[in-house]
Structure formats: structure tokens, C-alpha cells
Image (cartoon, rainbow, N blue to C red):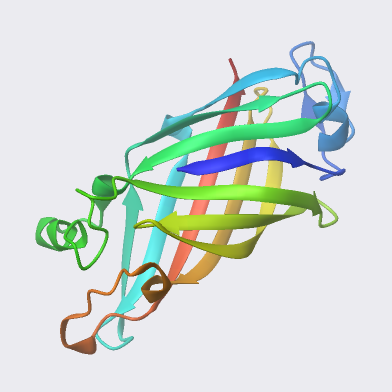
Amino acid sequence: MLRIIEGRLAPLVRAGYANGRGDEMSSVATFLSSPEAVGVWDLDTGESSIRFENGTMWGALKVRGAFTDFSGSGEIKDSKTVSGRVDIKAASVNTGLGTRDHDLRRSNFFDTDRYPDITVVVTSGESAGGDSARLNAELTVKGITGSFPLKVDVTPLGDGAVRLTTETTVTRKQFAVEGNFLGMVGNRTRLRASLVFRKA
């Protein structure tokens, strides 16, 4: 579950944004302050992805996968305050191998029966220059929360949607995701998200 809650964003990008009238807005900051932006934005799950990558076989191989069941929405208010929420169902983990996915749902990995959701909460944000923002985030997995910074790229799309992309590396044992047959599974996991939001 990814939550962007009451985070005030400074000017983010110098990129054109086409609103419903076909006008070009000079930056995402301008977009956020425009009447067209105010309101609820729904996550387009068909155009979005949440992926991960982890080393195995003592680093010789990479396991890549995704979470396939998630939903969410965001809201832009008159004060330029951005809020939102994305729910990720941990049991939707998919690496392309059924037996491995079954293991990942068990208690020594995600323990999806007890902890069905994965949560990211953004506590603050600021411009990082260009088309990027820096966000301070909290990731909660299996009831354990850790803080980390996120760099997010913001891309206005020509059809009126906005794409947010980010990636970061976390250590899975910090969140009690400790399954490790014969010590083959690496501790560092790369997370990548590409999220498209459309005006409701």
C-alpha cells in the first residue's frame, strides 16, 4: 500500500503538460496549481507496474518479479497538497514460477495470511531539480516500518495523465523477510514502481 499523504511539493519539472483544453503548462508546479488539477486522480493499474529484483544462487542469478494486484487514487487540493493511496496485495507476488511464489507467501518471507498489505507512506517532499522530486518515505512490510528517501521522476503524459516513476534498494531482513535456503538469497532487494494517474 503506497500512500502519499499530505506532502507539499515544490516546483518539480520543467516539462509541458497538456490539459483538457490542449494548453501547455510550463511545469508540474503550474499544473498542480491549476483548476484542472484539483480533485481526485485514479491509479490506472493497466498502465502501472510495481516490480522487484533480488539476487539468488549466491549472487550468480537475478530473480525478477512483480505485484499484480494493486489499486489506488490520489487527490490534489487547492493548497497544492498532494495525497493518495495505493494498496498492494502481498499475495499477488509473481515471479513466473508457481512453487517459488508459494514459498514467498509463507511465513519466512511475506507471511501474506497475517500481513496481506505492503505499505509505503510519504511524509514529506521537495524539488530535486529538473523533472525529479525527493520524498521521505516509510515502508511497512510484515508490520515493520523503515524510513528511506525516494527520488521520483514526474512525467506529464500527452493524454492528460501523469506518470510517477521511482526505484530504491531495501534490505529485506530489516522487515523480517528472512527466508534463505542454503544462504543463496541476497539481502538487498531492488524495488521499481511506475504509476500512472488519471483525473477521475
Front in this rendered view, residue 145 or 67: 145
Q: Position of residue 156 (x, y in %)?
A: 71, 34
Residue at the spot 71% in from the left edge and 33% down from the top edge: 82
Q: Residue furthest top?
A: 21
Is 169 on the left-hand or right-hand side of 31?
left
Q: Position of residue 158 (x, y in %)?
A: 69, 27
Front in this rendered view, residue 169 or 8: 8
Q: How many marks?
A: 0
Residue at the spot 32% in from the left edge and 38% down from the top edge: 69
Quadrant where the image shows the N terminus: top left
Vertical side of 181 occupied by 152: above or below: above
Vertical side of 20 occupied by 192: above or below: below
Q: Position of residue 73 (x, y in %)?
A: 54, 27
Vertical side of 74 occupied by 179: above or below: below
**Residue 11 appears in which quarter of the rendering?**
top right
Is 135 on the left-hand or right-hand side of 180?
right
Quadrant where the image shows the C terminus: top right
Residue at the spot 21% in from the left edge and 56% down from the top edge: 96
Front in this rendered view, residue 44 or 150: 150
Q: Residue furthest left?
A: 99
Residue at the spot 13% in from the left edge and 57% down from the top edge: 102
Is 6 on the left-hand or right-hand side of 167?
right
Front in this rendered view, residue 27 or 151: 151
Q: Position of residue 132 (x, y in %)?
A: 76, 53
Is 3 on the left-hand or right-hand side of 62?
right
